[in-house]
Image (cartoon, grey):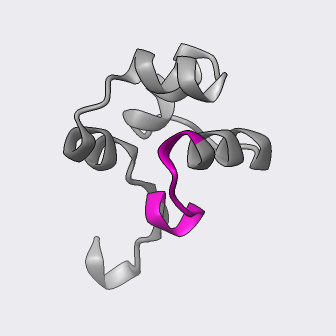
Amino acid sequence: MPIKFNLSRILGERRIKITELAEKAGVANNTVLALYHERAKGVTFEVLEKICIALDCEPGDILSLVREEEK
């Protein structure tokens, strides 16, 4: 996947549980779980916005581009 979702790192650093984020963001637990484990095929702007608001961060804080040489 060329775009990495760094949610597991951020939640680990902040010691926030998946269920806690899902509840605070108003997003389904399964959605957060899929993003956390990088199994999601995509994410809507609405979900991304809710997660960013809940974590008080910018989209660039949780999304990163994986370049070919970094794989």
Residue drawn at 42 percent across, 40 percent down: 38
Quarter occupied by the C terminus: bottom left
Considering only vertical position in the picture, is 56 above or below 41?
below
Q: In this view, does 46 lie to the left or right of 53?
A: right
Find residue 3 and report its horizontal and vertical position in percent: 50, 63
Quadrant assignment, res 27: top right
Find residue 23 and report its horizontal and vertical position in percent: 55, 17
Q: In this view, does 38 lie to the left or right of 50?
A: left
Asked whether 57 falls inside the magenta stretch, the response is yes
Residue drawn at 66 percent across, 22 percent down: 26
User: Magenta part of the protein: which range?
Assistant: 54-62
Asked whether 47 falls inside the magenta stretch, the response is no
Considering only vertical position in the picture, is 10 above or below 20?
below
Residue drawn at 55 percent across, 36 percent down: 40
Residue drawn at 39 percent across, 45 percent down: 7
* 68 or 6, nearer to the observer: 6
Q: How many marks?
A: 0
Find residue 19 and report its horizontal and vertical position in percent: 43, 15
**Helix, strand or loop: magenta stretch:** helix
Residue farthest front in this picture: 56
